[in-house]
Image (tube, coloured by chain):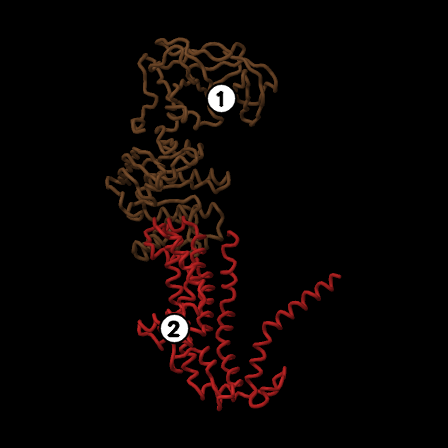
C-alpha cells in the first residue's frame, strides 16, 4: 500500500515535449484513471510511473520514497500491458512465477503465491498451458495474475481491456473492480474508454496534450466540467455546444442570447464576463427536452433508436445542431419541427478561454466548480 | 492436359533432384573403387571396397584433420551465436549513437571477397602469434560468419514485441536475464538456422585454412583433402579423395536432418505474425 506523488513531472523525447509539468497526488488505496484522447500522454505518464521511461525533470514518490532513479522492479509496482505481454515460451505457472523467481523467493513461497492468485482469478486449471493455448480473456487474467503475485504497492494498468471483445470487457472490468475492493491496493489505470473510467475510478484524471485538464470524481467531472475540453470529452453522445452572446449579468446568473432563439439565464457567477462577450453554452443531450413552449425551435434531421432511449438530431438554422436524448421510443419523425427547452440549471457556460464559469451556490456565493483539492494541481 | 502438367512437374522435380544429388552419388560410388576402375565411367557400384576409407586414415593424419574441423567449426558457431545474440540485443533494442553506422560497417565487412583480405588477415594472425594454430582459423572464420549472424538475429530481435521485454523488466530482470531467459528461447529457430549456416561456412572454409596453416596436423579437412598426394607427384589419389569427401559430408547432412524442422521455422519466422 502506498501513495503516489508526482511533482512537476516533465518528459521530452529529444525535442518533443510530451508531458508538461504534471502535479498529481494519488492517495493510498485509490483507483485513479487516466483518460484522454490518443496521444495525450496518458500512457507515457503511466510508463514514467512504472519506470519504463526516464523522467526528464520533476520528482516521483511512491510510498514517500523518491523513485526517479529506481529500476521498475524496485519501485513496488506491477504492470498489466494492453497486449498482455506474456512470455510465450513459458507455461502460465512459469509466467506468474518468473518475477518471484528473479526475486529469489523460495520454491514453496512461489508455489503458494501462484496458486493463490490462480484461485482468485479462476485459472487454476490453466496453469500448465502455454499462452498461445489461451483465449484473450484468459491471457489477460494471467497477465493480471502475474501482477498480483508480486504483491505490488501500486498496480498499473495500460488499457488492459482494449483487446477484448465487448462482453468480456464488461466481465473483466467487474473483476478488476473486485480486485481493487479485495486488495485495497493503489491502482492507476489508463484507458480511452469513458465507461471504464466512469465505472472504475475513484477519481479521474483527464489529460490533454500532456497536461492535466481536470482531476475529480467521475460525477464531479460529468456534472461540473472545469473547461470545454473535459465537457466535450466526457459523456456520449457529446455535450451540445452553442456559441452565444452575454446579454445581461446579474446576481442570479448570466443571461445569454441564443442564436435564432430566446434568452436563457444560467445560474453561474459572471467571473469577469461582461455583456456583449461571446461565450459557449454547453448542455448535455439528456437535458434538452422537446416541449410545447421551448426556447428554440428546429427541424429534426435524424432519429436514432436505441431501444431504451432514442437520439434526435435537430438543426436549428445556419448549420447549428443539437443532439437530444429522450427515454423510450421516438415520438417524432425526420423533418418535423420541434420546440426545445433547455434546463437552465443543467447548462454550462464557458469563457472564450474554454474555462467554465463557476456555479452560484444556493446562498448566492460562487462555489468552486470542482470541490476536489486536486483541481488546484491542474 | 492435367495429367501432362503433373507429369511435367514431376519430371522437373526428378531433374532437379538428379542435378543436385548426382555429384555426391558419383563421389560415393567412386570412393568404393580403386586403381584403374576409377577412370572408367560407371553409374552403379560394383562392389563395396573400403580400402580407400582405410587409406585415408593411414596415409595422413585425417582423424586429426576431422577433429580440427570440428573444433574450429564448433567454436565458430558458439562464438558467432554468443556474440551475435548479444550484439543483436544491442542493435535491436538499445538506441545509441552510431547504431546504423555500425550495422552498415558490419555489413560492409561481408562485402569483401576473402582473397582481398587474405594478406591483411595473414599479417594480423602472424602478429597475434596465431599462425598455424586452430585459434587463428577460428578468428579468421568469424569474419565470415559474424556479419550475417548479427544481421539475421538483429532483424529477428526487432520483431519480438517490446512489451515482453518491459514486462520482464517490471518482473525484475536485468538485460542479461532478458536475453538469456526470455529472448533466447523465442529466438531458438533463428539461432539454430544461423548457427547451422555458420557451421557449414566454417566447415567448408578452404582459403583461410590453406593459408593460415603450415603443417598437416593443424589443417582442417578441406585443405587436407586438397593437399592429398598419391605415390608419385603425377598421380591424384581420386579414390581416397572421394572417400574423404564422403566422410566430411556426412556430419553436415546429419546436422541438417536433425535440425530440419527448426530451420524451416527459422527461415519463415517473422514472415507472418502469429
Q: Which residue is mark 2?
A: B137
The answer to whether residue A114 is seen in the rendering is no
Q: Chain of mark 1?
A: A
Q: Chain of mark 2?
A: B
State the quadrant of the N terminus of chain A: top left
The local crowd at label 1, few if under 14, some if 14 to 19, many if 20 or more residues have their Cα within 10 Å, is many
Looking at the image, which residue is at 39% across and 54% down?
B101
Q: Is residue A343 above or below residue A214?
A: above
Q: Which numbered tag is attached to residue A285?
A: 1
Chain B: give its colour: red
| SS label for mark 1 | helix
- The percent position of residue A321, horizontal first and vertical second, equals 52, 20
Is residue A266 or residue B133 the one in the foreground?
A: B133
Does A291 sit left or right of A60 as displayed?
Answer: right
- The percent position of residue A320, horizontal first and vertical second, equals 52, 18
Front disc: 2 or 1: 2
Is residue A169 or residue B193 the one in the foreground?
A: B193
The answer to whether residue A158 is seen in the rendering is yes
- The percent position of residue B86, horizontal first and vertical second, equals 37, 59
Is residue A342 or residue B118 the one in the foreground?
A: B118
Quadrant assignment, res A206: top left
Chain A: give its colour: brown
State the quadrant of the C terminus of chain A: top left
Looking at the image, which residue is at 54% across and 26% down?
A308
Amino acid at each position: 500500500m502506498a501513495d503516489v506523488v508526482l511533482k512537476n513531472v516533465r518528459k521530452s523525447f529529444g525535442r518533443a515535449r510530451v508531458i508538461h509539468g504534471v502535479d498529481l497526488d494519488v492517495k493510498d488505496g485509490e483507483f485513479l484513471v487516466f483518460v484522454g484522447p490518443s496521444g495525450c500522454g496518458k500512457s507515457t505518464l503511466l510508463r514514467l510511473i512504472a519506470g519504463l521511461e526516464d523522467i526528464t525533470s520533476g520528482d516521483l514518490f511512491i510510498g514517500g520514497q523518491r523513485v526517479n532513479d529506481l529500476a521498475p522492479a524496485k519501485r513496488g509496482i506491477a504492470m498489466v500491458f494492453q497486449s498482455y505481454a506474456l512470455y510465450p515460451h513459458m507455461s502460465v505457472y512459469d509466467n506468474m512465477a518468473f518475477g518471484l523467481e528473479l526475486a529469489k523467493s523460495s520454491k514453496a513461497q512461489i508455489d503458494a503465491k501462484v496458486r493463490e492468485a490462480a484461485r482468485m482469478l479462476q485459472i487454476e486449471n490453466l496453469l500448465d498451458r502455454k499462452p498461445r493455448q489461451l483465449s484473450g480473456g484468459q491471457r489477460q487474467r494471467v497477465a493480471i495474475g502475474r501482477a498480483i503475485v508480486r504483491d505490488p504497492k501500486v498496480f498499473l494498468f495500460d488499457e488492459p481491456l482494449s483487446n477484448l471483445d465487448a462482453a468480456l470487457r464488461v466481465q473483466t472490468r467487474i473483476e478488476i473492480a473486485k480486485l481493487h475492493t479485495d486488495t485495497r491496493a493503489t491502482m492507476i489505470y489508463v484507458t480511452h474508454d469513458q465507461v471504464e473510467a466512469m465505472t472504475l475510478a475513484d477519481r479521474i484524471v483527464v489529460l490533454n496534450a500532456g497536461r492535466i485538464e481536470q482531476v475529480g470524481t467521475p460525477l464531479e467531472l460529468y456534472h461540473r466540467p472545469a473547461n470545454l475540453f473535459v465537457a466535450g470529452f466526457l459523456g456520449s453522445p457529446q455535450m451540445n455546444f452553442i456559441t452565444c452572446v452575454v446579454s445581461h449579468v446579474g446576481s442570479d446568473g448570466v443571461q445569454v442570447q441564443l442564436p435564432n432563439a430566446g434568452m436563457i439565464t444560467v445560474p453561474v457567477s459572471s467571473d469577469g464576463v461582461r455583456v456583449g462577450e461571446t461565450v459557449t453554452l454547453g448542455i448535455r443531450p439528456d437535458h434538452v427536452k422537446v416541449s410545447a413552449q421551448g426556447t428554440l425551435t428546429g427541424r429534426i434531421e435524424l432519429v436514432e433508436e436505441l431501444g431504451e432511449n432514442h437520439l434526435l438530431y435537430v438543426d436549428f438554422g445556419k448549420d447549428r445542431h443539437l443532439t437530444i436524448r429522450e427515454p423510450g421510443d421516438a415520438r417524432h419523425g425526420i423533418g418535423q419541427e420541434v420546440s426545445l427547452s433547455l434546463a437552465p440549471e443543467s447548462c454550462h457556460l464557458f469563457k472564450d478561454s474554454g474555462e467554465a464559469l463557476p456555479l452560484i451556490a444556493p446562498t448566492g456565493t460562487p462555489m468552486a466548480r470542482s470541490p476536489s483539492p486536486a483541481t488546484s494541481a491542474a | 492436359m492435367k495429367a501432362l502438367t503433373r507429369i511435367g512437374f514431376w519430371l522437373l522435380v526428378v531433374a532437379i533432384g538428379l542435378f543436385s544429388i548426382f555429384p555426391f552419388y558419383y563421389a560415393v560410388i567412386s570412393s568404393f573403387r580403386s586403381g584403374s576402375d576409377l577412370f572408367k565411367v560407371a553409374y552403379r557400384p560394383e562392389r563395396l571396397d573400403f580400402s580407400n576409407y582405410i587409406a585415408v586414415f593411414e596415409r595422413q593424419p585425417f582423424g586429426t584433420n576431422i577433429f580440427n574441423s570440428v573444433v574450429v567449426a564448433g567454436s565458430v558457431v558458439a562464438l558467432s551465436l554468443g556474440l551475435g545474440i548479444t550484439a543483436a540485443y544491442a542493435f535491436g533494442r538499445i538506441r545509441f549513437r552510431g547504431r546504423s553506422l555500425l550495422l552498415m560497417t558490419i555489413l560492409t565487412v561481408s562485402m569483401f571477397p576473402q582473397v582481398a583480405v587474405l594478406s591483411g588477415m595473414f599479417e594480423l594472425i602472424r602478429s597475434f602469434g596465431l599462425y598455424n594454430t586452430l585459434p587463428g582459423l577460428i578468428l579468421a572464420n568469424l569474419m565470415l560468419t559474424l556479419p550475417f549472424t548479427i544481421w539475421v538475429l538483429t532483424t529477428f530481435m526487432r520483431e519480438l514485441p517490446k512489451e515482453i521485454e518491459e514486462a520482464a523488466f517490471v518482473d525484475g530482470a536485468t538485460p542479461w536475464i532478458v536475453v538469456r531467459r526470455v529472448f533466447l528461447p523465442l529466438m531458438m529457430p533463428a539461432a539454430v538456422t544461423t548457427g547451422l549456416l555458420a557451421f557449414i561456412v566454417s566447415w567448408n572454409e578452404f582459403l583461410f585454412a590453406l593459408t593460415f596453416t603450415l603443417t598437416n596436423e593443424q589443417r582442417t579437412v578441406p585443405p587436407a583433402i586438397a593437399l592429398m598426394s598419391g605415390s608419385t607427384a603425377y598421380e591424384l589419389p581420386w579414390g581416397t579423395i572421394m572417400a574423404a569427401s564422403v566422410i566430411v559430408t556426412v556430419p553436415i547432412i546429419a546436422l541438417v536432418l536433425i535440425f530440419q524442422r527448426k530451420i524451416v521455422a527459422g527461415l519463415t519466422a517473422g514472415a507472418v505474425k502469429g
